[in-house]
Image: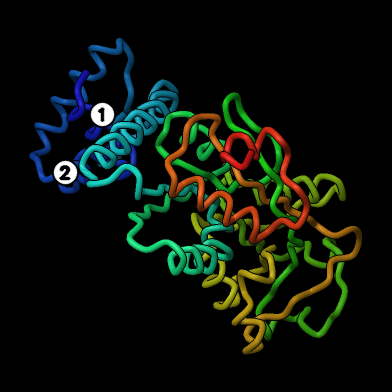
Amino acid sequence: MDLQQLTTFMAVSSERSLVGASRKLGVSQPTVTARMQQLEEELGEHLIIRAGHEAVLTPAGEVFRSYAERALQVLAAGLTRLQHESFERSLKIAGTSMFNTCALPDLLARFDRQENGVHIQVLTGSTPAILEWLQDQVADLGFVHGTAAMPHVRLVPLYSEELHLFVHRLHPLASREVVSLHDLRDETFIVGRRDDDTRDLIESRFRQEAFRPAHVMEMDHVSGMKQMLLAGMGAAFLPESAVREELRSRKVKKLELDGSPLMQRISLAVPDRSLNPVTRAFAVYSLKSFRADPLPLEVRRLLGLG
């Protein structure tokens, strides 16, 4: 098994087509076919099924995709570190789509004014993916939802934020101040992908209230959810920080949902290993920006705070 086979498999997976993969990689279709056949022979499993012009992953292909993606990410991280001039002045941050959209830009801008000349890379993923990236040293620090950690990764709660229900300003329910989920039984709900942590929280609320939305529109990123919301395509659960400007300009309307608030906890994920000075400095800066209470002793030791 070689790198070309893995990158070809991932291209076929994302393009859902051998022709599309060949265009993406800049190689001929026979080359793509040959690489896929070699990989399948080595693994002893069929990874794709051809359906007309489409290439659909088999159950074995679906399983293998997550491992191939992770292997390529680890390799890319290693190459980036080796190619960069100074290990001491590099910082690779991984965050959820929500955090990277709503909170990270201001946080990074303030830190950058304090620390000049830092090479920064930002990754976006789900909480489980981010925790794996930290274990594999693909990322230095993570911003995740919840508090359930993995081995060798410590989670420090930063803050909690409420998810509100937003609709377009011309939505029929925009004149209401308080609504129930069942008022929205015919509505389209704009949500994140199935591995999105915020979606898990929303669907848990749906189950508690025995509510099943009529339609669901799945988006990859918070920015896409906002655009669909502004186009009047449905309702979305978001923190106010995600639509602050749209609220100010009255393009969207916040509806109060009947019942208890829908709260989401954001935590800093710190790998249990030696961190370079810039990574430690950014971790401390982030904690001081969001927390007022003392840090746990083990976290202070990990960050070299005594």
Quick check: 179 left or right of 36?
right
Is residue 139 toward the left or the right of residue 243 in the image?
left
**Front in this rendered view, residue 204 or 273:** 273
Q: Could you tell me the amino acid type at mark 2?
A: Leu
User: Residue at 72% of width from left, 80% of height from top?
Assistant: 253
Can see residue 117?
yes
User: Which badge, 1 or 2, comes first in the chain's sequence?
Assistant: 1
Specify the quadrant that holds the C terminus. Answer: top right
Q: Which residue is mark 1?
A: 6
**Quick check: 6 left or right of 68?**
left
Position of 107 relative to 213 (above/below) = below
Mark sitting on residue 25: 2
Task: Give the answer, above or below, for where 187 lies relative to 287.
Answer: below
Q: Residue furthest front?
A: 306
Q: Residue 72, image x and y in percent?
A: 31, 33
What separation in Å lies between label 1 and label 2 (alpha carbons)?
Answer: 12 Å
Crowding near the residue tagged with mark 1, few <14, some 14–19, many ≥20 C-alpha atoms within 10 Å: many
Q: Residue at x 44, y 69 (%)?
A: 113
Q: Is 99 drawn above or below residue 305 in the view shown?
A: below
In percent of the image, x 47 and y 32: which residue is there? 274
87, 127: nearer the viewer: 87
- Say few, some or many: other residues with alpha carbon within 10 Å of mark 2 (under 14 / 14 to 19 / 20 or more): some
> In the rendered image, which quarter is residue 17 located in?
top left
Determine the secondary structure under disc 1: helix
Q: Where residue 79 sits: x, y (%)?
A: 24, 37
Numbered circles on residues, count: 2
Q: Return the residue nearer the eye: 136 or 124.
A: 136
Residue 151 position within the rendered picture, expressed as x and y whole percent measured from the top left: 60, 24
